[in-house]
Amino acid sequence: MGNDKILGRQEIHAYVEQWRRAGESIILANGNFDLLHVGHVRYLRAAKALGGKLVVAINSDESVRALKGEGRPIVPAEERAELVAALGDVDAVVIFAELDVRALIHEIRPDIQAKGTDYTAESVPERDTLAEYGGRVEIVGDAKDHSTSEIIRSRLGPRRP
């Protein structure tokens, strides 16, 4: 992969602890990031604007397939991670295999979980996990006018097996 922002689950702990000791807040954003588009960029820029170090958790290929169905992801996890890590607002990227980020939240205890505008603070699945230790959810980014699924449907046509 060749990018020092892309970290394993153990490495991310050391970075988060170092940042915390330096007085930084930790912001977690997560998603599939399949076919990186302007909605992703705006979401991550808004997450970073909350102030602190931005960790982006990217679903593994297996978890994307489980969530989105056969034929997804279009882009393999390692390449999605490299693309997201190339963005200036992103401080670290980690790939996770679970269907949601609860386990990672337990591990790194972010101060804020930034979610896109397709959620409300009440609909974020991991909000209870954050509340256990005083973390919070922030809804950020522009209106959900962009999605990989919609790009595939409208521009690429139906997927063929």
Image: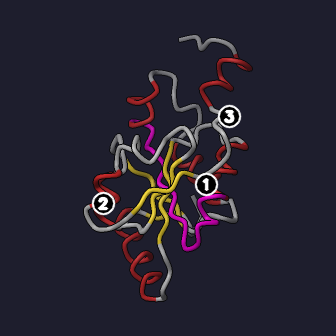
The magenta segment:
46-62
Question: Looking at the picture, does residue 117 appear above or below residue 83?
Answer: above
In the image, what residue occupies the spot 35% across and 40% down? 99
Quarter location, residue 136: bottom left
Q: Residue 11 in the image: state x and y as whole percent.
A: 40, 71
Say which residue label 1 marks: 82
Q: CA distance from mark 2 to mark 1?
A: 31 Å
User: In the rendered structure, which disc, 2 or 3, sits on the residue that comes first in sequence?
Assistant: 2
Q: Is residue 32 left or right of residue 108?
A: right
Q: Residue 27 in the image: state x and y as whole percent.
A: 49, 65
User: In the rendered structure, which disc, 2 or 1, sits on the residue that comes first in sequence?
Assistant: 1
Question: Looking at the picture, does residue 152 appear above or below residue 82?
Answer: above
Say which residue label 2 marks: 131
Q: Which element is circle 1 on?
A: helix
Q: CA distance from mark 3 to mark 1?
A: 21 Å
Alpha-carbon neighbours of circle 2 within 10 Å: few (<14), some, or many (≥20)?
A: few
Say which residue label 3 marks: 146
Alpha-carbon neighbours of circle 3 within 10 Å: few (<14), some, or many (≥20)?
A: few
